[in-house]
Image (cartoon, grey):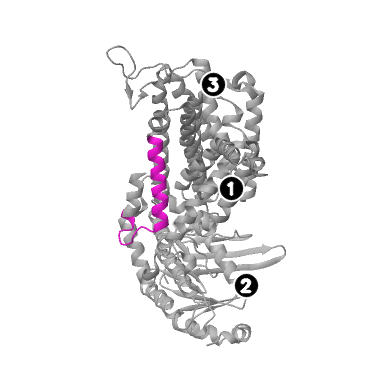
């Protein structure tokens, strides 16, 4: 992320970096630093769960932004690719036992399956109108969901699969031992396998995220935007629109599948609810809209806001309900059971004040006007 | 005469029963600027769309030099050297003026698939884009989104995109439409510059008679989708049929 900020600065040497852009990159950088040090800042289990989920979803949402934000492709199959990566890894870990070879083989097969499916869907249907393409992806995703629940011998059906991951990632694994054979602690945090697992997730997510930033800043990124803006003219100046669309659809599918691998390894459980359901697809859509379509960095902001709201809004409301216990009506409104209502209000306010998403609106205001 | 750089053979397209372009056979040679005239609905833009690939003909064939390009997609025709500017402004509205031109330069040079290098680091492409921006006098507004430009500047950008493609065959569809009197010469100068390079074939749909007189080596007249006259400007303009259908209908355009 630092490299990307510097690159933007280098690309526009004559101009000052506009205010809005500076704020967005500053916030994203701050989030990146918090995620990089999360196990030390928030050592409790639940916070690490949130941090890992944020890392994985940033990759998932940013890869979706390549499609919907940059190229204007509306797909409902993104969780399908995510699920392929997760399920392939899960099944390999279950059948081959908890080893890195299982993660590698299962992950590779999942990514390959995602790639093949993306090529097929892309070539068969990216020529047709956007709405038909969206329907095809919806159908494919539905089929995958039915398959996952029906082939319960492999997938565990609705219950999903639980499995062990390599012992290296277990909390009992001491990365460093002191003279007494106890695990070494840094700032009071045990340097154990759990920490290694978090950094496995974080570093992989960071590499993928930087990769996507590079992609959108490359000549290809501009071509994708050109296709979104004016498909017919992009074709007329010499770009094969179908080929470019298929290519980015495949790239996004592969990245989503890798995010699925991370999810499977982190959770030690894979089921429809956590890796394949349409509820996840809707989360992705909300996150990309809140963050700002066509920005990539918006994914970071959208994911953080949504995830924090999903995990902590109830707690916050609990506190608020207690604090206002003597006031009429308010405690009822702030009852934690009504957290979805407030999430809805939050979403409406965000869309109202940031019509192009948070990053999109801030960058747009600072940039062109 | 040298060998034709572009040739259409019995080119026909029917929408339902209506033949918008009907059996047009003609050939164009390098170094020649041909103005295509005809009243509204004569099939000029449709014929352009057939040549540049936006429409597929019902009958007939299109040749670029000796190569049959009838079945090629528009992107493949662009790569084969057929460049087209559009009548209605047809740009990438949210991208900057510079990015619009850069896209055309990079399409020709084929760097599209190099996905891990920053676009800004392709210095030669940036320089070339800058050169076209300066030629079209758009360098001062290069960082604005294309949609923020006034109409006249959008027309110039349309032409700049075409020039950046460096085609063998330039197709301009009313390049000065809706431009003010003092803006139009910029575009006409650009076309004149291209004409000086005698290796290019230029096709121009234009209504303004002063433009036609100043630039045309040859005039092709389309009427109801058919080619009804083809020849030197003075000969064609003198034809009674042309005077009647073209000058009659388009009299308000005669400057």
Quick one: A51 or B7, which is closer to the camera?
A51
Q: Are marks 2 and 3 in contact (CB under 8 Å)?
A: no
Magenta: main secondary structure equals helix
Within 10 Å of the Cα at label 3, are there few (<14), some (14-19), or many (20+) other Cα atoms? many
- The residue shown at (44%, 47%) is A297
Work out whether residue B69 can be spotted.
Answer: no
Quick one: A231 or A68, which is closer to the camera?
A68
For marks 2 and 3, give the CA distance: 67 Å
Q: Are marks 2 and 3 on the same chain?
A: no
The total number of labels drawn is: 3
The part of the image, by quadrant, that contains residue B220 is bottom right
Which of the image's four quarters has the C terminus of chain A?
Answer: bottom left
- Secondary structure beneath dot 3 equals helix
Q: Are marks 3 and 1 in contact (CB under 8 Å)?
A: no
For marks 3 and 1, give the CA distance: 37 Å
- Secondary structure beneath dot 2 equals strand
The part of the image, by quadrant, that contains residue B159 is bottom left
Q: Which residues are magenta?
A: A10-36
Vertical placement of residue B221 versus A80, above or below: below
Which residue, given by chain and number where applicable, does mark 1 sit on?
Answer: A347
Q: Where is residue A191 shown, x and y percent of the image? A: 35, 22
Q: Are marks 3 and 1 on the same chain?
A: yes
Q: Which mark is residue B226?
A: 2
Q: Where is residue A56 shown, x and y percent of the image? A: 48, 34
């Amino acid at each position: 992320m630092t490299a990307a900020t510097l690159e933007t600065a280098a690309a526009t040497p004559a101009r000052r970096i506009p205010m809005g852009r500076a704020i967005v990159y500053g916030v994203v950088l701050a989030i990146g630093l918090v995620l990089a040090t999360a196990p030390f800042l928030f050592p409790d289990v639940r916070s690490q769960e949130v941090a890992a989920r944020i890392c994985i979803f940033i990759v998932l949402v940013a890869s979706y932004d390549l499609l919907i934000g940059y190229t204007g492709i509306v797909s409902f199959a993104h969780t399908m690719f995510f699920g392929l990566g997760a399920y392939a890894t899960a099944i390999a870990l279950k059948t081959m036992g908890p080893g890195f070879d299982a993660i590698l083989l299962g992950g590779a097969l999942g990514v390959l399956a995602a790639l093949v499916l993306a090529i097929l869907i892309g070539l068969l249907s990216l020529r047709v109108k956007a709405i038909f393409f969206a329907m095809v992806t919806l159908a494919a995703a539905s089929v995958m969901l039915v398959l996952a629940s029906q082939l319960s011998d492999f997938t565990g059906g609705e219950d999903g699969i639980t499995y062990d991951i390599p012992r290296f990632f277990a909390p009992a694994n001491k990365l460093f031992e002191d003279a007494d054979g106890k695990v070494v602690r840094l700032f009071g945090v045990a340097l154990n396998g759990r920490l290694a697992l978090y950094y496995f997730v974080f570093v992989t997510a960071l590499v993928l995220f930087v990769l996507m930033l590079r992609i959108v800043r490359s000549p290809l990124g501009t071509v994708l935007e050109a296709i979104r803006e004016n498909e017919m003219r992009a074709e007329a100046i010499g770009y094969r629109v179908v080929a470019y669309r298929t290519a980015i659809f495949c790239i996004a599918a592969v990245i989503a599948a890798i995010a699925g691998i991370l999810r499977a390894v982190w959770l030690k459980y894979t089921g429809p609810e956590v890796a394949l359901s349409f509820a996840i697809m809707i989360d992705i859509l909300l996150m990309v809209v809140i963050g700002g379509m066509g920005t990539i960095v918006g994914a970071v902001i959208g994911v953080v806001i949504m995830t924090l709201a999903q995990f902590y809004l109830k707690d916050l409301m609990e506190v608020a309900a207690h604090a206002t216990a003597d006031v009429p009506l308010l405690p009822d409104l702030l009852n934690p059971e009504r957290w979805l209502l407030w999430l809805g209000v939050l979403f409406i306010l965000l869309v109202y004040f940031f019509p192009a998403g948070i990053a999109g609106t801030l960058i747009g205001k600072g940039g062109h006007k | 005469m040298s060998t034709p750089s572009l040739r259409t053979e019995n080119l026909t397209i029917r929408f339902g029963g209506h033949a918008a372009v009907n059996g047009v056979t003609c050939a164009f040679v390098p170094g020649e600027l041909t103005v295509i005239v005809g009243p509204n609905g004569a099939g000029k833009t449709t014929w352009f769309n057939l040549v540049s690939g936006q429409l597929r003909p019902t009958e007939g064939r299109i040749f670029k030099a000796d190569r049959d390009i009838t079945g090629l997609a528009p992107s493949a025709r662009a790569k084969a050297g057929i460049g087209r500017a559009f009548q209605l402004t047809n740009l990438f509205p949210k991208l900057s003026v510079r990015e619009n031109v850069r896209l055309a330069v990079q399409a020709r040079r084929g760097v599209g698939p190099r996905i891990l290098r920053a676009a800004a680091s392709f210095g030669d492409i940036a320089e070339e884009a800058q050169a076209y921006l300066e030629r079209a006098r758009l360098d001062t507004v290069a960082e604005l989104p294309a949609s923020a430009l006034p109409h006249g500047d959008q027309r110039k950008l349309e032409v700049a995109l075409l020039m950046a493609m460096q085609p063998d065959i330039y197709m301009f569809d009313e390049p000065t439409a809706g431009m003010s009197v003092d803006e139009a010469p910029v575009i006409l100068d650009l076309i004149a510059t291209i004409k000086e390079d005698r290796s290019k074939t230029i096709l121009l749909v234009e209504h303004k008679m002063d433009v036609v007189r100043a630039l045309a080596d040859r005039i092709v007249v389309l009427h109801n989708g058919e080619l009804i006259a083809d020849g030197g400007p003075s000969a064609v303009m003198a034809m009674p049929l042309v005077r009647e259908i073209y000058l009659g209908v388009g009299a308000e355009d005669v400057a």
